[in-house]
């Protein structure tokens, strides 16, 4: 192989190796982002559940306080 062709072949091989490395890095970042998105969805679901429980408790407290106030003649 002539020296110029050998140099071009070597350059192409280097570019391909770099491209593979970039693709691997991008895939790793994408995987991490997908995992983080899943964790966030799960976290938000837990928060919504906690807020629902808290809202139920607050409603029960309000109902009890209202009942007490009404039984004491306060409106």
Image: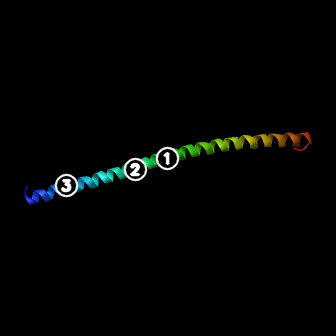
Q: Which mark is residue 28?
A: 2
Point out the tag, 1 or 2, that comes first from the N-terminus.
2
Find residue 70 and report its horizontal and vertical position in percent: 88, 40
Q: Does 9 sit above or below residue 39?
A: below
Q: Quadrant of residue 61?
A: top right
Find residue 10 and report its horizontal and vertical position in percent: 18, 57
Find residue 22 and report its horizontal and vertical position in percent: 32, 53
Q: Which mark is residue 1?
A: none
- Closer-to-camera residue (33/15): 15
* Tag 3 secondary structure: helix
Q: Residue at x 48, y 46 (%)?
A: 35
Q: Residue at x 88, y 41 (%)?
A: 68
* Tag 1 secondary structure: helix
* Residue at far left of view: 2
Q: CA distance from mark 1 to mark 2?
A: 14 Å
* Residue at far right of view: 72
Q: Residue at x 54, y 44 (%)?
A: 41
- Closer-to-camera residue (36/6): 6
* Residue at far front of view: 1
Q: CA distance from mark 1 to mark 3?
A: 37 Å
Q: Does 46 sit above or below residue 11?
A: above
The residue labelled by disc 1 is 37
- Closer-to-camera residue (35/48): 35
The residue labelled by disc 3 is 12
The local crowd at label 1, few if under 14, some if 14 to 19, many if 20 or more residues have their Cα within 10 Å, is few
Q: CA distance from mark 3 to mark 2?
A: 24 Å
């Amino acid at each position: 192989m002539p020296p110029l062709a050998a140099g071009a072949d070597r350059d192409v091989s280097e570019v391909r190796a770099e491209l593979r490395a970039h693709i691997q890095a991008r895939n790793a970042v994408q995987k991490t982002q997908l995992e983080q998105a899943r964790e966030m969805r799960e976290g938000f679901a837990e928060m919504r559940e906690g807020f629902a429980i808290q809202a139920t408790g607050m409603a029960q407290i309000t109902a009890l306080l209202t009942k007490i106030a009404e039984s004491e003649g306060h409106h």
